[in-house]
Amino acid sequence: MNAEMAETGLRKNDHKSDVIAERSGSCGLITLNRPKALNALSLPMLRELLSILQAWRDDPAVLLVAIRGSNKVGRPGTPESLFGGFCAGGDLRFFHQAALAGDPSLEDFFTVEYTLNHLIHNYPKPYIAFLDGIVMGGGMGISQGAKVRIVTEHTKMAMPETNVGLFPDVGGGYFLSRCPGHVGEYLALTGEVIGADDAIRFGLADVKLEAARLPALWDALAAQAFQDTAQVEAWIAIHLIATGTRPDWARAEFDNFFSLPDVVQIIRALEAAEGDWARKTAATLRKRSPLMLHVTLEQIRRARAMTLADDLRMECGMMHHCFHLRPGDRSETVEGIRALVIDKDHEPRWKPAKIEKVTPDMVAPFFESPWTAQTHPLRGL
């Protein structure tokens, strides 16, 4: 990085911070620095990211923003410690603890996170996301709105929320519903992990580069002395967009099943079909929260006709209900996190236990806003 490196809130070498923000020339550079937790987002991290991006949005000297995650391999401050991991999502342990304690900061978490997601999707300056390694949940929320989403041979991308009794939030309804065909329903319901090639094919990434090239590219961005936005756009077009190709979308088995009207019909069709993929997919769905599968399918299909802001407002209400329709340890979400993250017995006690037992009356309350339009925490989006 060049001699013009400036401090912005955090010191250049403050590797104790969970978010490292640096200025180099006309570039703002962000590193998620919580590698032992796979850069899972905490409420302080979200607030810091929001503050940084708002400041750089309003700073005419910043013409470009890039974000990456740090990797727990290697020593802090050395090249091998960077890249290799982007963000595993939100801090599930915090969700569990806060929900059981009735901690109001749980509501703050999602209000700040969704505000941040909306800002990134509408950022007025090029925002480049280096999506090496794990990119899941909240990591998708801070990257899907990027102008350029760079993936590598190490990328593992997913929205796995139904596995813990949640739904794909952070704008997941918006960006998954805009995948080609009905692949969005497939990804949302199963939580399937995809690699770089599928991420590009499904419209969830733009460019695939070898992971070994990322440090040099990051340094090249930091070394640029852009004069205006036009120069930034030209540099991106030459060095990034020109290297990316998106394979043609071929309607695959996804549409044959995930276009069906409801979850019961989807899973019965999968179980009746021949082939390993259909059987494996059906078995995966049987492990997920039956209630949240129904909620998620409804979410994706509603969001297809929504703006991002309206989708985030809907998801904010849905998230509130995940923790309050059944408060405390009766929450489907609390139980899912307990089984998968806290106790790790991998035996969640879903209620209802079977997909066929979920009724429309169980699903409908998730889509009733707990606030009026005037009191909604995201009314300003």
Image (cartoon, rainbow, N blue to C red):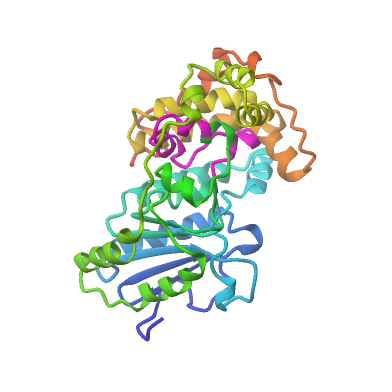
Q: Quadrant of residue 22?
A: bottom left
- Picture coordinates of residue 342 (x, y %)? 75, 44
- Is 185 left or right of 246, judged from the image as shown? right
Q: Is residue 299 visible?
A: yes
Q: How many marks?
A: 0
Q: For residue 366: magenta?
A: no
Quarter that holds the C terminus: top left
On screen, residue 50 above or below 220: above
Q: For residue 185: magenta?
A: yes
Q: Residue at x 66, y 62 (%)?
A: 36
* Region of the chain picked out in magenta, as a range: 158-186
Given residues 335 and 150, the one toward you in this image is: 150
- Picture coordinates of residue 40 (x, y %)? 59, 54
- Is 56 left or right of 22, judged from the image as shown? left
- Is 263 left or right of 65, judged from the image as shown? right
- Picture coordinates of residue 101 (x, y %)? 68, 41
Q: Is residue 319 visible?
A: no
Q: Residue at x 36, y 29 (%)?
A: 373
Given residues 302 and 236, the one toward you in this image is: 236
Given residues 358 and 287, the one toward you in this image is: 287
On screen, residue 279 above or below 100: above
Q: Residue at x 68, y 28 (%)?
A: 283
Q: Which residue is farthest front?
A: 275
Quarter that holds the N terminus: bottom left
- Picture coordinates of residue 210 (x, y %)? 48, 64
